[in-house]
Amino acid sequence: MDGKIIVISGPSGAGKTSICNALLEQLPNTIWSVSATTRPPRSGETDGVSYRFLSSGEFEAIEAAGEFAESAEYVGHKYGTPRKPLEEAIAVGKNVVVEIDVQGGMQIASALPESVRIFVMPPNETSLRARLEGRKTEAKEVLNERLAQADGEIAIARDSGCYDHFVVNDVLEKTIEDVKRIVQENTRA
Ligand code: 5GP
């Protein structure tokens, strides 16, 4: 039996990466999809682990060859999910966690409707700002652009009907348990 794609989306700072890391640690047979991006690496990010960091030209060549399962532009940079590793993992029964924005989530929903799609919401805007400021990964201008994007993303996620599950990340440990339960109920994990 094929594995499943588990899409995790949500505004920047909602806690997606912590949730994904917990899923990968705690669920058997579950792997991470390494996205490609034209965004520069943050300190602590390793090429080929967090992302494949590409130039715009490299990204466009892969995109033109149809080698992304989905791709999107987010706050001035391109992001895409390489198709081949995803298909290979699913074919051998692995579940693949794909952390992508709502534009990508919509593309996966229509191309691979059997995927499980979860949208992580921040409890409120104040906590979203506090988390983004606290992690100190973005310059102020970029941080404000990401916050401005958040409302739009939440509205699209709701209106598109592409997400089967919405979880509010108030207490991280509880959110992880909620997301794990959703994944277990919808896959063989
Ligand atoms: P960040 O720059 O904070 O790592 O990611 C910015 C946004 O891009 C986040 O919403 C993240 O989920 C999304 N993202 C990361 N990889 C991909 C991808 O491969 N495709 C799409 N569509 N979005 C991605």
Image: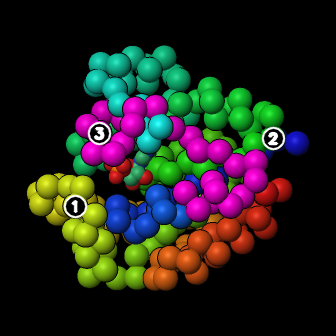
**What type is the residue that disc 3 sits on?**
Pro
**What type is the residue that disc 1 sits on?**
Lys
The front one of 112 and 94 is 94
Q: Considering only order in the chain, which callout, 3 or 2, is on the residue closer to the N terminus?
A: 3
Write down the residue under mark 2. Answer: 93
Quarter holding the N terminus is top right
The front one of 148 and 47 is 47
Q: Is residue 110 visible?
A: no
Q: Does label 2 point to a residue whose CB lies under 8 Å from ligand 1?
A: no
Q: Does label 3 point to a residue whose CB lies under 8 Å from ligand 1?
A: no
Q: Residue at x 46, y 82 (%)?
A: 170
Res. 126 mark: none
**What type is the residue that disc 2 sits on?**
Gly
**Residue 161 sits in quarter:** bottom right
Horizontal side of 24 relative to 160 (left or right) equals: right
Q: Which residues are magenta?
A: 21-48
Write down the residue under mark 1. Answer: 136
Q: Considering only order in the chain, which callout, 3 or 1, is on the residue closer to the N terminus?
A: 3
Q: Residue at x 34, y 26 (%)?
A: 54
Picture coordinates of residue 124, whole percent (x, y): 34, 82
Res. 41 mark: 3
Picture coordinates of residue 74, whole percent (x, y): 31, 47
Mark 1–mark 3 distance (CA, rounded to whole Å) = 14 Å
